[in-house]
Structures are given as structure tokens and as C-alpha cells.
Amino acid sequence: MSLLEVKDIDVHYGDFLALRDVSLNVEPGTIVSLIGANGAGKSTIMNTICGLNKPSKGEIIFDGQNISGKKPHQIAKAGLSMAPEGSHCFESMTVQDNLLMGAYMAKGPERMERLEGVYKLFPILKEKAKQQSTYLSGGQRQMLAIGRGIMTQPKILLCDEISLGLAPVVINDIYDKLKEIAATGLTMLIVEQNVTRSLQASDYAYVVLEGKIVMEGKSSELNEDEVNDAYFGINSFA
Ligand SMILES: Nc1ncnc2c1ncn2[C@@H]1O[C@H](COP(=O)(O)OP(=O)(O)OP(=O)(O)O)[C@@H](O)[C@H]1O
Ligand SMILES: [Mg+2]
């Protein structure tokens, strides 16, 4: 059974139809990626799943519950955590406090255990633990955003634009970490614009074009040239 099932959703911003008949599935223990150009609708899909946008049609089933129309905090409580695009954090708080915020509902020892888990994954965050988050570099912020997501011990972690504005070497490092996280059994839905990287990092991928899913498949079986054509809306059968 799918952990997350998006069924035929439409999403409007005013009169603008941003998503049309979008359906996708995320099986437990897998990394699924959304690929698409700027403005394709990737963030809209992510934001709708976590309750920031309301679909005007269709439904979203998470862990057996219909979460369509639920509030973001209810969805978070059900076990869905989102590391948003642009990696927002509480700037004036320390790195450690930002991480601990992610696990505010857990008991003391449990929180510290999760914190150590995140520090093991991202040792740089341990080094910067007492620093104000505002001084973190772009890559470190992404790590903090992912770390905070993990602190909630979600059933699924959504990561929007992990590699935005980062140097390739930092991106590789973050993707290596994601594989490590996935190996612990955490399920992930990620957004990645780079086709090669997206296919390498995921088990299954969806290509989004102008608010619609135009291609999907196992990442290892998708043809990169065909994905590129779909990404740019080039009809390869024309
Ligand atoms: N709050 C909003 N109000 C009105 N239109 C919006 C809003 N948010 C997004 N849109 C529009 O919806 C479409 C999809 O935007 P979205 O942010 O989902 O794209 P994206 O695939 O995440 O792009 P990017 O790769 O640039 O982040 C775009 O045309 C965008 O202008
Ligand atoms: Mg986006």
C-alpha cells in the first residue's frame, strides 16, 4: 500500500489553474522525485500535500487517512514533515535550538537522541550548534532544514529544491546524506530540477509540465533524453 497517494487533484490560485488532474504515489521506504522547469507546479504539489494549498478537486491519502483540506499542523502531526524551498529557519535562534524545535513534542532524552542522530549525519551542524542560524552558509541551511525535518521523526519527509543555489560538491554531499537517511527506512518526496541528479537520487520520478504530470517511471528505467524532452514540453512523437 502507498504511504502517500495524491488522486486527481486540481489546484487554483484565484482563476489560475496551477495543477490539473495530478496523481502520484509514494511507496514506503522509497525516494520519489518531482522533476520540472521553473513554474511547472512542483512547489504547488508539495505545498498542497502539506496543507498550505487546498485542492479544488481530488483527494490526498496519507498513511490511510484522507488529509485533503486538513490544516498544516494536523498533517504534520500525522507524520508528514516538509523542508521548504529556500530553507527557512528561525534566524535569531541557534542551530541547536532550531533543531530542537523540530522535536518539541518529544521527551527530553528522546530529543537529545534525535539531535545526536542529526549531528552524526551532518557533523558541521554540531560544530555550529551554538551559532545563530543566520550565519549559516546556503548548504548548511539546507542541512539544517533537512535536519529539522528529521527531528520530527516523520513517516515522510518532503524536500523542496534541495540543491537551490549550491555548489555541485555540496549538492553531492547532501544527496549522499539523503541516501543514508533513506537507508534507515525514511520515505522521501523531493523536488530537483537537475534531471541527471534527480534520477540518480530517486527510486521513482514524475515529470511535471505546466501543472500536469507528463511522464513517470522507475528512475533506473527512465530515459534521460526522453525525460529532458518531457521537461521542456517537446513532444518526442511529433
Ligand atoms: N501564491 C500564488 N499565487 C498565484 N500564482 C502562484 C502562486 N504560487 C505559484 N503560482 C504560480 O503557479 C505556477 C506554479 O508555481 P510553482 O511555485 O508551483 O512552480 P515550481 O515548479 O515550484 O517552480 P520553481 O522551480 O521555479 O520553484 C507558476 O505559474 C506560479 O507563477
Ligand atoms: Mg518551486
Image (cartoon, grey):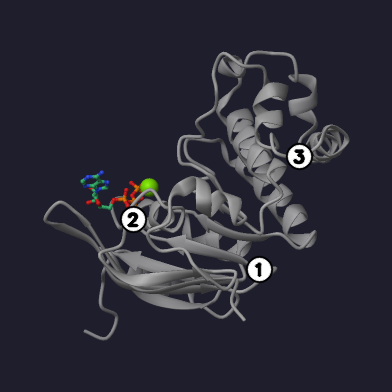
Q: Nearer the viewer, mark 3 or mark 1?
A: 3
Which disc number belongs to residue 37? 2
Give the answer, above or below, for where 133 lies relative to 202.
Answer: above
Q: Amino acid at mark 2?
A: Ala
Q: Give percent across and percent down for residue 64.
A: 57, 73
Q: Position of residue 13 (x, y in %)?
A: 20, 52
Quarter that holds the C terminus = bottom left
Residue closer to the observer: 33 or 194: 33
Reading the chain from its start, which is encountered first: label 3 or label 1?
A: 1
- For residue 93, which quarter of the picture? top right
Q: Quadrant of the N terminus?
A: bottom right
Badge 1 is on which residue? Answer: 30
> Which is more N-terminal, label 2 or label 3?
2
Give the labeled residue for mark 3. Answer: 106
Seen in the image, is 215 located left or right of residue 236? right
Q: Residue at x 54, y 18 (%)?
A: 91
Type of the residue with mark 3: Ala
Q: Position of residue 49 (x, y in %)?
A: 44, 58
Residue at the image point whose x is 64% and y is 33% from the top: 144
Q: Earlier in the sequence, mark 1 or mark 2?
A: 1
Would you say the beta carbon of the disc 3 residue lies within 8 angstroms of ligand 2?
no
